[in-house]
Image: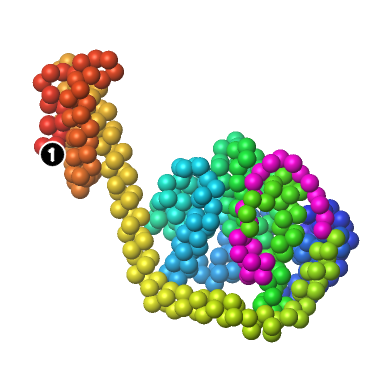
Amino acid sequence: MSDTRCDLCGDSSCSVISDTDRHGQPLTTVMCDNCGLVRHRDIPSEEELREFYSTNYREEYNGERIPGPRRIMRAWNNGLRICRQISNHLPSGGSVFEVGAGIGCTVKVFERDGFAAKGIDPGGEFLKFSHDKLHADVAVGNLYDLPEDRSFDAVLLVHVIEHLRSPKLALLKIATLLKPGGLFYVECPNLSAPFARRSQLFHTAHIHNFVPATLRMLAESTGYRLRQRFGDERDPNLQMLFEYTGQCQLNVDPENVPRTLQELQRSDTLPYLARPRYLVDRARKLASYGEEHLRARSFVADLISTCQSAKREQEARRAAWYFLYVQLTTEWIPNGRFRLQAVRLFTLSVTYPERCRELRRVQGAVSAFHDSRILSGRRLPSDGRIAATAFAV
Ligand SMILES: [Zn+2]
């Protein structure tokens, strides 16, 4: 149950900084005396965490088992923001993988932006929504069970790292999923954000709490180099993009412990709250909450409808190309043409009655092939009825 060594620097000396969580329940939080990483004193085992996240986590943590419209709308907008932030750093059509994909919005946003995007999540109704409604490529899975095949251009870890018993192990594992020079994007709460009251900071599900320096030290100690930081040091969330270099360097910032302790005092809360930028940000946030209230239901209905028709289009395209393939191959089988065509046309007309537009596109392609009269070095049959019979359905 208890792990006394710091996950970042390995030091076993630490000091208690809080005895309660944000709800006033007992929770002992400590800070490493050497590097300043803040963590639970008693860290649950991997088995306990797997059990927690695959069963009742969403209900306990988010207060809902099935994602509500406002949560979905917010997740989609966050996905758009993340895609905007990092897509310029990725190759066109590159591969993106999200660990802890939740509702699946971010994966879907990247997919719609032309990337090969997929993800994993421990399971539950959030994953079911992602799968059934958004048709996002998100599967049940655990980071440590993934094959180490270095196949992704980027791995995302959005509001996940704070839940892990060993962020260091997770980052080392993620390195094995990345192509050489691949990118790692991480987002998590910022312990040093000045507006959060100390009594509201700690949460049972947040095993580790990061400030900018500890997140950066952790990434550098596991072979990453900072590519870009988004937002401000005092923003409520840290958003960082790292590049994997394979050079692990633990550079403990000696100023981090006193600085974090000072930030935890929150002595500058009032001046911080009175800043114009804070007030503008707050006004924007309230406006976005209002918009969520007004628009979330219709937004989610439109989103689901768009994803469903995109899925149908994709299936129709696949069926159409399959049809084209069979058509072209059977055309050359003597005497087999009519029987195969009958079965094929019947199947397609029952399965995809609405896909005429796709078929017209295929018809164009077939006609182009046919006009050229050459396919794989052979002449096509001269009667030219390849397309015409199919589109009579
Ligand atoms: Zn430490």
Q: In the drawing, does residue 302 fall left or right of residue 36? A: left
- Residue drawn 71% across the image and 58% down it: 215
Q: In the drawing, does residue 358 fall left or right of residue 385? A: right
Question: For residue 229, what is the image quadrant?
Answer: bottom right
- Whether residue 234 is in magenta: the answer is yes
Of 110 and 304, nearer the camera is: 110
Compared with residue 12, is residue 64 higher up or lower down, i.e. above or below?
below
- Residue drawn 82% across the image and 55% down it: 252
Q: Which residues are magenta?
A: 230-253
Q: In the drawing, does residue 355 fall left or right of residue 191? A: left
Residue 162 x %, y %: 67, 61
Find the residue positioned furthest to the front: 276
| Residue 363 visible in image | yes
- Whether residue 207 is in magenta: the answer is no
What amino acid does circle 1 point to?
Answer: Val
Q: In the drawing, does residue 99 fall left or right of residue 318? A: right
Image quadrant occupied by the N terminus: bottom right
Q: Which residue is mark 1?
A: 393
Of 383 and 235, nearer the camera is: 235
Of 301 and 88, nearer the camera is: 88
Residue 223 x %, y %: 72, 44
Task: Check disc 1 and report its element: helix, strand or loop.
Answer: loop
Compared with residue 348, is residue 308 higher up or lower down, i.e. above or below?
below
Compared with residue 90, is residue 286 higher up or lower down, i.e. above or below?
below
Question: For residue 298, what is the image quadrant?
Answer: bottom left
Q: Main secondary structure of the magenta part?
A: loop
| Residue 148 visible in image | no
Residue 259 x %, y %: 80, 69
Say few, some or many: other residues with alpha carbon within 10 Å of mark 1 (under 14 / 14 to 19 / 20 or more).
few
Residue 105 x %, y %: 46, 58
